[in-house]
């Protein structure tokens, strides 16, 4: 499915895409290493795909929630907050803005409120389960597709803060220019197709529904395993 892809070759849904992606990831040997590898799905879009990858490869499963809090200025990247398998990560730009409370009280108040709202959402999705230890592990970071690469790059940045030994980015479809950029940020990028023209990710799924908080919590409940 590399290069030009017709609408007739779309995935039926996230589960079908996950089955296909798992088959390719299995061929790379990512599931080797005594079961210590972990699938982390970018919520919300990557949850259905990542869940099927974890099922097929018999790996632990968790999620990464991400929210942009600051718009990029010029060449600067946007500032984000993430919950990486239960561990909160705040980009340097956001942390610096929070530290300037006396200089920018309105911005500080906005960020504090947004972070509290984000933490509440992360708790609703995770159901109170403890954070998953990722240090020293191979992590497969899964999304349902990569258009500009900004979401995957922000997720990779947050994930690196947990000190995994290796990070494999994975998506069923990607726009070719974004694929190159994400490949440079990850240790490896596994992708099934680079449709051209790409359009947007939803074009490559007949059913593009995204999971609710309850759906994410149910997926985590299903895949919960004892710590390796």
Image: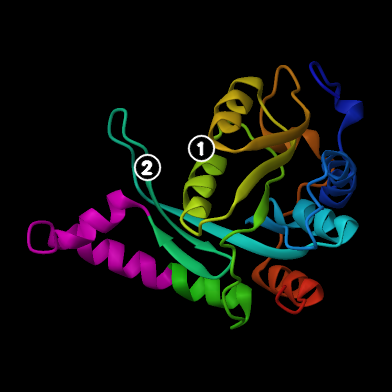
SS type, badge 2: loop
Q: Is residue 110 left or right of residue 143?
A: left
Is 92 within the magenta? yes
Highlighted range, magenta:
91-117
**x and y, in percent, of residue 45 in the image:** 68, 51
User: Pointer 2: residues within 10 angstroms few (<14), some, or many (20+)?
Assistant: some
**x and y, in percent, of residue 20 in the image:** 89, 42
Residue 151: name its quadrant. Answer: top right
Q: Residue at label 2?
A: 78
Is 31 within the magenta? no
Q: Residue 166 carries which label?
A: none
Query: Are the two marked residues, 2 and 1, in contact with CB atoms closer than 8 angstroms?
Result: yes
Q: Is the magenta stretch mostly helix, strand or loop?
A: helix
Q: Is residue 163 left or right of residue 168?
A: left
Report, in whole angstroms, how far the alpha carbon at label 2 lies from the one at label 1: 9 Å
**Image point 62% across, 46% down: which residue?**
167
Vertical placement of residue 125 versus 58, above or below: below
Q: Residue at label 1?
A: 150
**x and y, in percent, of residue 99 in the image:** 18, 61
For marks 2 and 1 on the same chain, the one whose residue lies earlier in the sequence: 2
- In what quadrant of the picture does the N terminus appear? top right
Q: In this view, does 211 lie to the left or right of 122?
A: right
Residue 198: name its quadrant. Answer: top right
**Image point 66% across, 36% down: which residue?**
188
**x and y, in percent, of residue 177 in the image:** 59, 20
Vertical placement of residue 50 versus 1, above or below: below
Q: Is residue 120 left or right of residue 115?
A: right
**Image point 92% across, 27% down: which residue?**
8
User: Exactly how many numbered labels are in the figure?
Assistant: 2
């Amino acid at each position: 499915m590399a290069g030009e892809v017709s609408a007739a070759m779309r995935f039926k849904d996230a589960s079908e895409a996950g089955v296909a992606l798992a088959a390719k990831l299995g061929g790379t040997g990512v599931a080797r290493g005594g079961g210590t590898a972990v699938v982390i799905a970018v919520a919300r879009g990557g949850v259905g795909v990542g869940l099927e990858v974890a099922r097929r490869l018999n790996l632990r499963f968790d999620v990464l929630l991400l929210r942009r809090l600051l718009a990029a200025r010029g060449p600067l990247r946007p500032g984000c907050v993430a919950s990486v398998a239960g561990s909160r990560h705040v980009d340097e730009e956001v942390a610096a803005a929070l530290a300037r409370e006396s200089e920018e009280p309105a911005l500080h108040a906005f960020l504090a409120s947004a972070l509290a709202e984000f933490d509440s959402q992360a708790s609703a999705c995770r159901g109170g389960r403890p954070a998953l230890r990722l240090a020293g592990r191979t992590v497969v970071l899964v999304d349902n597709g990569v258009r500009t690469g900004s979401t995957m790059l922000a997720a990779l940045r947050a994930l690196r803060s947990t000190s995994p030994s290796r990070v494999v980015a994975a998506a069923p479809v990607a726009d070719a220019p974004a694929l190159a950029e994400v490949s440079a940020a990850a240790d490896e990028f596994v992708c099934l197709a680079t449709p051209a023209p790409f359009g947007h990710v939803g074009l490559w799924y007949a059913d593009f529904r995204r999971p609710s908080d309850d759906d994410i919590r149910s997926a985590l409940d299903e895949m919960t395993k004892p710590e390796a």
